[in-house]
Amino acid sequence: MTEPLHTFPDWMSFYDQMPIDKMPWYHAELDSDLAEALQAAKLSGKKGLDLGTGPGTQAIELARQGYQMTGSDLSASAVRQAAELADKACVSAEWVADDVLASQLQGPFDFIFDRGCFHVLPPNTRTQYVDTVADLLDPEGTLFLKCFSRLQPSEVGPYRFSPEQVRDIFSSRFELVSIKETVYQGQLAELPKALFSVLKRK
Ligand SMILES: C[S@@+](CC[C@H](N)C(=O)[O-])C[C@H]1O[C@@H](n2cnc3c(N)ncnc32)[C@H](O)[C@@H]1O
């Protein structure tokens, strides 16, 4: 039997079914590609959104570094557990259950970090995603995007992208500042191959 392509958990219940620190994407430290990019970036301000925050570790680490963070996720359970993790770490951030494809969030944000949300969305929603994210950003805002690379073998799980595809998908609203081949840090023994992009709102 052939394996199903690009199937995803039911995000609404998944965060009640597994401890967050066992999830493949759980990474307690700040994503090293984002850390490096933030050093180089000239951000318009400190207000950030961790979109599809999941366990919330990235928003928590950014808040610890002095950014004014909101973490949003489709899953209310993810958001609740992220808030609990932040409380334990004595870190202050805002946590919101929100579907990026029908977003009620209020911008503007100076930057948005998407580590693994975009690449699980259906292809026919990408234009809507791009418009929503652009509208949530300040006119000078930056999107930091981590998604699976087309160099990651097989087609099971998240969608894969080439640098050209990222440029094309975002070109209506974003200028691609940089893109690099990297890995998606987390709990897997072999870290998936990923792309890390810096996109400036046009
Ligand atoms: C691969 S996980 C990454 C979680 C987190 N960014 C991290 O790196 O630890 C993808 C996340 O996207 C969330 N997600 C999926 N579809 C979404 C949507 N339409 N709106 C907001 N979040 C969504 C899922 O609930 C899940 O937490």
Image (tube, grey):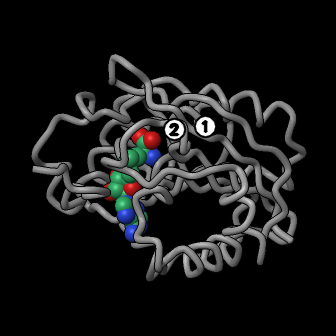
Residue 141: percent from left, percent from top: 80, 61
Ligand 1 resides in the quarter of the picture at bottom left
Mark 2 and ligand 1: say if the CB distance to the nearest ligand atom is below 8 Å: yes
Marks 2 & 1, CB-CB < 8 Å contact: yes
Marks 2, 1: nearer the viewer: 2
Mark identifier at residue 62: 1
Q: Is residue 82 visible?
A: yes
Report the front residue among 135 and 189.
189
Number of labels in the image equals: 2
Q: Quadrant of residue 87?
A: top left
Q: Quadrant of residue 63?
A: top right
Looking at the image, is 59 positioned above or below residue 172?
Answer: above
Image quarter where the C terminus lies is bottom right
Residue at the location (77% across, 36% down)?
38
Residue 27: percent from left, percent from top: 42, 28
Residue at the location (56% across, 81% down)?
128
Residue at the location (36% across, 32% down)?
26
Residue at the location (21% across, 55% down)?
4
Q: Amino acid at mark 1?
A: Leu
Q: Which residue is mark 2?
A: 58
> Seen in the image, is 178 located left or right of residue 121?
right
